[in-house]
Image (tube, rainbow, N blue to C red):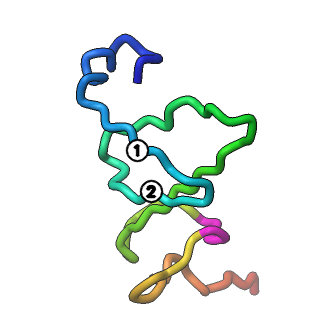
Amino acid sequence: MDGHHVFASLIDQSIPIPMKIGGILVFDSLAFHSVGINVTDKTRRSIAIGYTSVDELLPVQDNTYREVVSGERLYRGSELKWVNL
């Protein structure tokens, strides 16, 4: 948070949450957050998971990394094929 002067006034409100190797922290992405400095000589991995309604109108055609957890994927196209006669 101290990397940008706009957030300098929020440093007093910060709460450090140390994590063990392999640990997981789950929080609402709308919560103001920062990853902090990596004090190890190893890289860190972050995974962002988002949940949306099955009828969310997202302009994403590639569903490779999307999984329907509940409900069913809605049909978003037409199976009609034009035939020139």
The residue labelled by disc 2 is 25
Q: Is residue 14 above or below residue 71?
A: above
- Closer mark to the observer between disc 2 and disc 1: 1
Q: Are marks 2 and 1 in contact (CB under 8 Å)?
A: yes
Left or right position of 84 against 56: right
Q: Position of residue 70 (x, y in %)?
A: 41, 86
Q: Is residue 58 above or below residue 82?
A: above
The residue labelled by disc 1 is 17
Q: CA distance from mark 2 to mark 1?
A: 9 Å
Q: Nearer the viewer, residue 15 or 68?
A: 15
Left or right position of 10 against 62: left
Tell me where the magenta segment starts and ends, as one range.
61-65
Identify the residue shown where x is 47% and y is 17%.
Answer: 3
Please tell me in which quadrant of the rendered image residue 65 appears: bottom right
Dot 2 amino acid type: Leu
Q: Decide whether the magenta segment is chiefly helix, strand or loop.
A: loop
Identify the residue shown where x is 67% and y is 84%.
Answer: 81
Q: Position of residue 43 (x, y in %)?
A: 72, 42
Can residue 55 be found in the magenta stretch?
no
Identify the residue shown where x is 25% and y is 23%.
Answer: 12
Q: Is residue 4 above or below residue 72?
A: above
